């Protein structure tokens, strides 16, 4: 109770809870904040039919945060579409929360399991795993995202047989079939594959320290199995820093995904894997500088989503700092 009182006595923790709570509330209240055209099959985007203006439209009663435009290529030619920024902003909150939570949680679980096993076994296994983490740290994440995207892009490629004048599809690999069957976002998969190393290192160091303590030796003397030892005693005593890093990574994963989408690494604007906030950034990037060099002429095309991403990252980082003070006994004593 004392630590809980200390947690709620910090003003920044209240700020963190307010920011994160606002996004959670917005995601929950999306059907009421911006009712979809089809209540049974709600979409994260809403197109204003009949709008033919060739520039984004400013905020109005029909579009509270204005619109961004997209030229979509179809069988009948090129179509001009006006996407409602407010609708995508509200409904996109669900997408970014889902993306951030799933990616950060999967990364934490993978890194925790690898670090706990390698730290407990020790010896050559731990040395090999730590050298492997060094290799992953040296490999840029953006290159990993591009690699996964190219691998998945090959699933739709077909070779043309000029002898028989027909297309011959390239057989999909087992990895491609699994990813397509589970409908996994390649960017999410790449972030998980290249972000687990921090968790593994942190858990490995903690496990090495904990297995030398008296309670571990006592459990061994009672004949406790290794798996039960790791799950029942070691991981619960080393999970504090993991939870802190997990909270911070929720916002970090979303920001990374938005950055990759903005520069065009994670796919085209029509890709269903791109969350709506990132889609709005892609559609609005051509209007950041308006005619005459005015950066605020079309401010609604990029400013609301950019501000939301900044606040999303700040909220989860502040929450991580608060959890660090709450879970770290030495930090609590200093306060």
Image (spheres, rainbow, N blue to C red):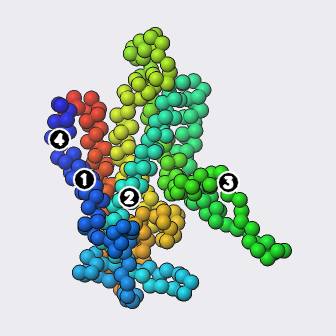
Q: How far across and down, in percent of the image, does residue 172 sit?
A: 67, 57
Label 1 vs 2, first from the N-terminus: 1
Q: Quadrant of residue 9?
A: top left
Mark nearest the camera among 4 and 1 is 1
Mark nearest the camera among 3 and 4 is 3
**Tag 1 residue:** 21
**Could you tell me if the residues under marks 3 and 4 are in contact, i.e. CB atoms within 8 Å?**
no
**Tag 4 residue:** 8
Q: Secondary structure at mark 4?
A: helix
Q: How far across and down, in percent of the image, does residue 3 sit?
A: 20, 33
Name the residue located 37 percent from the left edge and 75 percent from the top edge. Answer: 46
Q: Quadrant of residue 35?
A: bottom left
**Tag 2 residue:** 96
Label 1 vs 3, first from the N-terminus: 1
Q: How far across and down, in percent of the image, does residue 67 sit?
A: 34, 78
Between the C-alphas of marks 3 and 4, the distance is 51 Å
Q: Is residue 260 above or below residue 329?
A: below
Between the C-alphas of marks 4 and 2, the distance is 27 Å
Within 10 angstroms of label 3, few (less than 14), some, or many (20 or more) residues? few
Label 3 vs 4, first from the N-terminus: 4
């Amino acid at each position: 109770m004392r630590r809980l009182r200390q947690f709620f006595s910090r003003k920044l923790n209240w700020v963190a809870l307010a920011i994160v709570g606002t996004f959670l509330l917005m995601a929950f209240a999306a059907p009421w904040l911006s009712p979809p055209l089809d209540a049974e099959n709600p979409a994260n985007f809403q197109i204003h039919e009949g709008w033919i203006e060739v520039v984004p439209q400013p905020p109005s009663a029909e579009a509270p945060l204005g619109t961004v435009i997209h030229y979509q290529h179809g069988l009948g030619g090129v179509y001009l579409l006006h996407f409602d920024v407010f609708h995508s902003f509200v409904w996109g909150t669900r997408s970014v929360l889902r993306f951030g939570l799933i990616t950060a949680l999967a990364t934490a679980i993978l890194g925790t399991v690898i670090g706990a096993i390698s730290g407990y076994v020790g010896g050559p296994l731990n040395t090999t795993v730590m050298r492997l983490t060094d290799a992953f740290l040296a490999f840029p994440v953006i290159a990993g995202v591009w690699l996964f995207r190219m691998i998945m892009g090959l699933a739709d490629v077909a070779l043309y047989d000029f002898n028989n004048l027909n297309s011959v599809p390239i057989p999909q690999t087992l990895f491609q079939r699994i990813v397509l069957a589970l409908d996994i976002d390649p960017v999410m998969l790449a972030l998980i594959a290249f972000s687990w190393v921090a968790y593994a290192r942190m858990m490995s160091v903690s496990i090495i320290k904990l297995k030398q303590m008296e309670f571990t030796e006592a459990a061994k003397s009672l004949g406790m199995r290794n798996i039960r030892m790791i799950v029942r005693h070691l991981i619960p005593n080393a999970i504090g820093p993991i939870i802190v890093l997990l909270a911070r990574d929720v916002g970090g994963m979303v920001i990374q995904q938005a950055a990759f989408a903005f520069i065009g690494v994670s796919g085209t604007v029509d890709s269903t894997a791109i969350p709506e906030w990132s889609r709005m950034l892609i559609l609005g990037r051509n209007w950041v500088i308006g005619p005459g060099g005015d950066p605020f002429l079309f401010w609604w095309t990029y400013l609301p989503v950019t501000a939301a991403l900044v606040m999303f990252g700040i909220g989860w980082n502040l929450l991580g700092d608060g959890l660090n003070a709450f879970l770290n006994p030495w930090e609590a004593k200093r306060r």
